[in-house]
Image (spheres, rainbow, N blue to C red):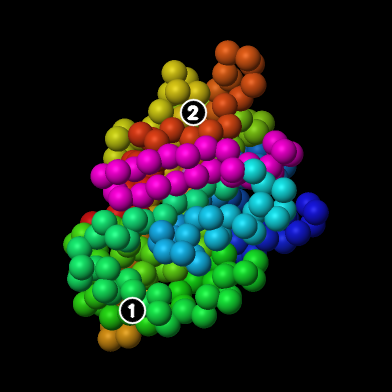
Amino acid sequence: MHTHINELFTGLWHDYLTITPSAHKIHTLLKAHNGKAELVNDHIALRTFAIPGIAVSDLALHFIQLGYVKSGEYDFSSKKLNAWHYQHPDPNLPKVFISELKVNELSPVSQAIISEIIDSMDFNAVAQPDFLYSGTHWQISETDYRTLLNESEYAAWLAAWGFRANHFTVSVNHLSSMTELSEVNALLKASGFTLNTAGGEIKGDPSVCLAQSSTMADQMPIKFSDNTVTLPSCFYEFAQRYPLPNGELYQGFVAASADKIFESTNVN
Ligand code: NI
């Protein structure tokens, strides 16, 4: 069972690195600081549209088949998103955070653009595990991308990059050389990486049992049907978890913090 889980995360990781070269550099840097021990991935995040056939519940089936359990629900009303997180009984396996855009709350023009790109998809592909890192299944023009961007950064990102891990997350709790998220942030900044400062460099704190930070997404070329444009791709996240009153580390997410983490892919 774990073989399949490892294969899936390896596929997601390699796809993610192709458009997130800074994550490879940071991974190498932190691993060197960690006595060359492998880093532990706290979670990945996936994005999709709330459309039957490709909604969170459809994507999550891949993880449920591998033993994952739906564990937490989150609402981001200002961004028109719902999200759930899934975790495996083995606490060493990464959690999976999947969000979906409530397309029916967008303007008619944005809804029409999304309908058009989705109509060109083969929905049978969704059942294949590699669908989770298959990218786009459509062509979109830069004009339509910009129309979506005016209304929803999330819609525009998803239309440009498609289905893939939006970020991986280093578990600070599992680092041997550093114990605090602030130390990780200091090392990253000293090494020239840019952190997301929306809502403060560190989102959350011990009072909510989770502190998170992230880089700003890399800038990578996207080939639209009419033009090639350099845009934010994916980012790397860092999470420090704190114990609940029962002594166990909190395993959920904090909506107010995740709301700001989403902005790591904002277009300037
Ligand atoms: Ni995250």
The answer to whether one can see residue 142 in this image is yes
Q: From what the image shows, is residue 185 above or below residue 65?
A: above
On the image, the x and y values in percent for residue 8 come to 67, 60
Q: Which residue is mark 1?
A: 116
On the image, the x and y values in percent for residue 82 come to 40, 47
Does 62 sit left or right of 241 as displayed?
Answer: right
For the N terminus, which image quadrant?
Answer: bottom right
* Residue at figure coordinates x 43%, y 43% from the top left: 214
Q: Is mark 2 within 8 Å of ligand 1?
A: no
Q: Mark 2: which amino acid?
A: Leu
Q: Mark 2 against mark 1, which lies toward the viewer? A: 1
Q: Mark 1: which amino acid?
A: Glu
Q: From what the image shows, is residue 217 above or below residue 71?
A: below
Calculate the distance from the C-alpha at mark 2 to the C-alpha at mark 1: 39 Å
| Residues rendered magenta in the picture | 70-95
* Residue at figure coordinates x 37%, y 77% from the top left: 117
For the C terminus, which image quadrant?
Answer: bottom left
Q: Which residue is mark 2?
A: 210
Residue extending furthest toward the bottom = 226
On the image, the x and y values in percent for residue 91 come to 70, 36
Find residue 230 and report its image quarter.
bottom left
Q: Nearest the camera: 238 or 45?
A: 45
* Residue at figure coordinates x 63%, y 14% from the top left: 246
Q: Residues within 10 Å of mark 1 (few under 14, many from 20)?
A: some
Assign a secondary structure to mark 2: strand
Mark toward the start of the polypeptide (2 vs 1): 1
Q: From what the image shows, is residue 140 above or below residue 214?
A: below
Q: From what the image shows, is residue 157 above or below residue 201?
A: below
